[in-house]
């Protein structure tokens, strides 16, 4: 896996339109992923960390009749694109997507997410978008 420095350097070549990071977090703190205020706080802190300017308010909505998928979903527009996520109550998992045409350090970002939600396990996928 490439380091943040290598990823940002590759992205800086300007042959890409955007950088996308998917962060899957497992065995998270159930109290945190079920708290809309904490999710909004997470978004503010994440945007500050990766220097993304939020555009509008963070939307956090709880839904899902099927217990397997019910939980909060979150969206936050940023001036350079979008941060979104779903918080699965049944499995205490979090599925985040950070997409931006501005570079950011994906591993540092993922580590912050893991720490905030107190996840025991994590998977990260970085994609360069053309």
Image: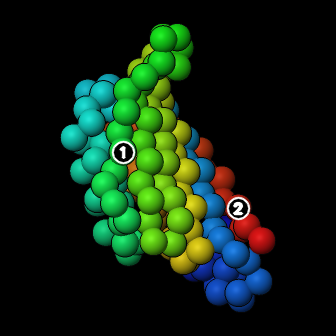
Count of numbered marks: 2
Please tell me whether residue 14 is drawn above or below residue 20 in the rendered image: below
The disc label shown at residue 127, or none: 2
Image quadrant assignment for residue 21: bottom right
From the viewer's perspective, is 13 left or right of 109?
A: right
Give the image location of residue 3, x and y in percent.
60, 71
From the viewer's perspective, is 12 left or right of 41?
A: right
For mark 1, what is the residue?
Answer: 59
Please tell me whether residue 36 is drawn above or below residue 66 in the rendered image: below
Residue closer to the observer: 29 or 13: 13
| Tag 2 secondary structure | strand
Please tell me whether residue 50 is drawn above or below residue 88 in the rendered image: below
Q: Residue at x 30, y 43 (%)?
A: 39
Query: Which quarter of the rendered picture does the N terminus lie within?
Result: bottom right
| Tag 1 secondary structure | strand
Q: Nearer the viewer, mark 2 or mark 1?
A: 1
Q: Earlier in the sequence, mark 2 or mark 1?
A: 1
Residue 22 visible in the current orientation = yes
Residue closer to the observer: 67 or 13: 67
Query: Which quarter of the rendered picture does the C terminus lie within?
Result: bottom right
From the viewer's perspective, is 14 left or right of 59?
A: right
Q: Residue at x 37, y 72 (%)?
A: 53
The disc label shown at residue 74, or none: none
- Dot 2 crowding, Cα within 10 Å, few <14, some 14–19, many 20+: few
- Dot 1 crowding, Cα within 10 Å, few <14, some 14–19, many 20+: some
């Amino acid at each position: 896996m490439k380091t943040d420095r290598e990823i940002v350097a590759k992205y800086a070549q300007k042959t890409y339109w955007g950088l996308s990071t998917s962060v899957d977090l497992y065995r998270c703190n159930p109290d945190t992923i079920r708290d809309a205020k904490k999710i909004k706080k997470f978004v503010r802190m994440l945007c500050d960390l990766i220097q993304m300017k939020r555009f509008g308010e963070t939307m956090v909505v709880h839904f899902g009749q099927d217990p397997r998928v019910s939980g909060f979903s979150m969206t936050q527009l940023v001036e350079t694109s979008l941060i979104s996520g779903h918080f699965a109550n049944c499995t205490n998992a979090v599925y985040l997507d950070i997409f931006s045409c501005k570079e950011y350090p994906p591993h540092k970002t993922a580590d912050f997410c893991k720490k905030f939600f107190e996840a025991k396990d994590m998977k990260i996928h970085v994609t360069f978008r053309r």
